[in-house]
């Protein structure tokens, strides 16, 4: 089914490119958003390649997660199973549609897609190509909701929709979280931190900080606050400032840095907790690793944080102590992504602590099911069998 | 820490038995409930044994669930991590307190316990023994909330409480689900089914059905509806009726059975979807396996269902086709339980499709965390590294 979808996307390339929303949107939306609406042959080929990669993975459903002999002739397995029906709400980004549809198909879930109106034509064209490629089951498996008014009604259907995944800005996600009883997987904020430790290799720090801010400033995994150990001194701060400015970043000072180095003349950070979603970034000093961890817990969003250090003990303390979905050592926060994590694709990144956390691929769209096979066993006040609880291999 | 708790329970056995609520409750609550309030030396010894079994398990935190090489020198792990703060609300059942406290300790979670007022003295005594045994950290790790009014306030704390687990009747659970934005793990109903297939070994069926109803009728995993393939004929129905009556069950007829066998004079089932929580049970006929599955999906609660058959293909169709937390073949629904599943103990049984499903032990109280270790890698529009995505062993 997935191979048919991949083939159909390539075969219908011309039509998909024609049915887009770029011309109508030109001048009405930001250029960055406009770029996302364009469907090029290269983008379509990449999508098809991604879908074939998802198809090539091992079958994810009915995978045995654990198997034990409960008693003689009584075997219990924990197996993966589809969650049920997913509602995915996404803003103007038509290439998300085939990716999400493929992950839902692979995980055996039914899908309700609610796309942004800015990409209405693209979404309709892509949905039609995919549903037609699936065949008779297509319309029952993947539905596209187009009317704007229907969101509020969909969010009330907690008896038939099992999970909502909003893909969009803070406002969209917060609104959905506040207005439904259906579990919501996703993140409202991406306030990522990099902590440059006193034992940092400064060259690595400069390279990573510049990448984390400038590679894609509007992404949720871009860095918003850089915390610098004060032992690195003025020279350390100056080097980071220069590296950030070299990639076009607009550096703001946190309270402690502003007080310590007023002569730098940096604008004040709008708040200790602030997502710029642009080339803006806050630079702040800390006296110790623990102060960095405390700062992250006080002002972060539990998304992705990275420590730059050559001190293995400091790295381990950070990786253990920081309570975020993703914690990195000597790597850019931009790696926090389903494709870069080897998941093939992602439906989104979750900062929730329940169910899936971090980038969510096929695995995060599965639940589990306990399957027990016996030959007439009864409990009889726990005298019916002799419990053995013997672990068995899962394959 | 867990061993100290187990030792302390045994050492304070006398005090725990004295500080109970049995005398005050006598005459005010049902006998079955009263039995639960009694703390005997045997019960305390079993609790201590269970806690030592939990302590003997492999360390559950920071367990590596997957490990891949993302690129040369860039390794990503998915590790287990505590969820955070759990709120567990339970009705009169003081022995649940040490079990739940031990599972929370083992999984590294903070715990707010809200016990039923019927067991207030027992709960306070058990809580004190456990917190004292833990030592200085005790009061910060496990708090006991005693005031009745505080529940509504606790349910508002979605910024600090990560998961609510209600242990109690349908009313309590439904009330909590309707009145909090915190994720709720548990089940409101336990409407379990047994389907006696046309290829059933009738002796096994009789034994299993009797056990599933009478072993502990008030339990959530007791059977409420027995579906019989009509190919088993009047003789099959009569045998099941006799087996159920022999253990004291009060058998009600479903609509089709009532129409087919009015002469049996069975009282009508109150509804196709009904939890007796007593020795009441509904007997109903079906024309086919698929009708049984459809009946379960229409009227069940997704808890536990069992098929009795010697036909391997029918068993597999049932185990795959029935969308419940636990699906069994030729075994009593009463096996659906954390201890009997080899989890050591359970905080409850979840019919939710998100996060943990079925009996929830230590594993269900964990989330995951992505840990990436590099040496200065940057994304640089995905040209910064050569992605390898090589699976590595987890140990």
Image (cartoon, coloured by chain):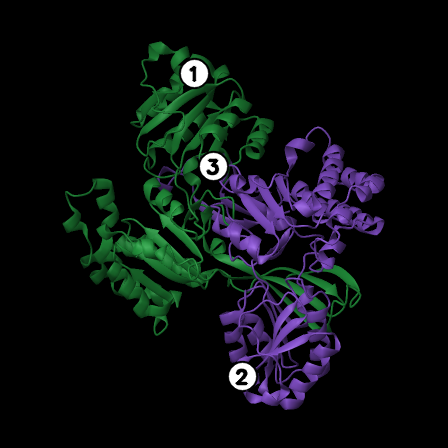
Chain colours: A green, B purple
* Left or right: where A153 falls relative to B9: left
**Residue B257 shows which numbered tag?**
none
Q: Locate residue A143: give its quadrant.
A: bottom left
Q: Which residue is mark 1?
A: A256
Q: Which residue is mark 3?
A: A302
Seen from the viewer's position, the closer of residues B87 and A228 is B87
Q: Is residue A238 visible?
A: yes
Lower sequence index among marks 3 and 1: 1
Q: Is residue B201 visible?
A: no
Mark 3 or 2, which is nearer the eye? 2
Q: Residues within 10 Å of mark 3 (few under 14, many from 20)?
A: many
Chain of the residue that carries numbered disc 2 in the rendered image: B
Residue B7: x and y in percent read 81, 40
Residue A256: x and y in percent read 43, 16
Chain of the residue that carries numbered disc 3 in the rendered image: A
Residue B392: x and y in percent read 57, 48
CA gap between label 3 and label 1 equals 23 Å
Q: Which residue is mark 2?
A: B256
Q: Residues within 10 Å of mark 1 (few under 14, many from 20)?
A: few
Chain of the residue that carries numbered disc 1 in the rendered image: A
């Amino acid at each position: 089914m997935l191979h048919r979808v991949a083939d159909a996307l390539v075969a219908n390339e011309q039509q998909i490119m024609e049915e887009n929303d770029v011309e109508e949107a030109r001048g009405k939306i930001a250029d960055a958003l406009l770029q996302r609406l364009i469907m090029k042959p290269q983008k379509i080929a990449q999508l098809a390649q991604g879908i074939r990669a998802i198809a090539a993975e091992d079958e994810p459903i009915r995978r045995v997660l654990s198997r034990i002999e409960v008693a003689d002739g009584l075997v219990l397995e924990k197996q993966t199973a589809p969650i049920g029906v997913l509602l995915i709400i996404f803003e103007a980004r038509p290439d998300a549609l085939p990716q999400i549809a493929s992950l839902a198909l692979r995980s055996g879930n039914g899908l309700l897609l609610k796309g942004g109106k800015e990409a209405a034509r693209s979404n309709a064209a892509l949905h039609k190509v995919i549903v037609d490629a699936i065949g008779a089951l297509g319309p029952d498996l993947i539905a596209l909701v187009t009317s704007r008014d229907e969101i509020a009604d969909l969010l009330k259907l907690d008896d038939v929709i099992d999970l909502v995944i909003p893909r969009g800005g803070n406002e969209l996600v917060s609104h959905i979280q506040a207005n439904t009883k259906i579990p919501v997987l996703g993140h409202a904020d991406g306030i990522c931190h990099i902590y440059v430790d006193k034992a940092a290799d400064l060259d690595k720090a400069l390279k990573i900080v510049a990448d984390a801010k400038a590679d894609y400033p509007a992404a949720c995994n871009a860095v918003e606050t850089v915390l610098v150990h004060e032992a690195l001194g003025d020279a350390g701060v100056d080097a980071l400032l220069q590296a950030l400015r070299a990639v076009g970043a607009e550096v703001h000072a946190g309270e402690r840095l502003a007080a310590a180095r007023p002569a730098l003349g940096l604008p004040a950070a709008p708040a200790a907790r602030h997502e710029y979603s642009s080339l803006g970034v806050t630079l702040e000093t800390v006296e110790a690793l623990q102060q960095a961890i405390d700062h992250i817990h006080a002002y972060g969003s539990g998304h992705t944080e990275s420590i730059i250090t050559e001190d293995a003990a400091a790295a381990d303390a950070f990786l253990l102590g920081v309570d975020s979905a993703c914690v990195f050592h000597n790597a850019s926060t931009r790696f926090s992504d389903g494709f870069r994590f080897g998941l093939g694709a992602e439906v989104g990144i979750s900062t929730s602590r329940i169910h899936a956390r971090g980038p969510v691929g096929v695995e995060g769209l599965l639940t589990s099911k306990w399957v027990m096979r016996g030959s007439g066993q009864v409990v009889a006040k726990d005298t019916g069998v002799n419990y053995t609880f013997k672990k068995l291999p899962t394959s």
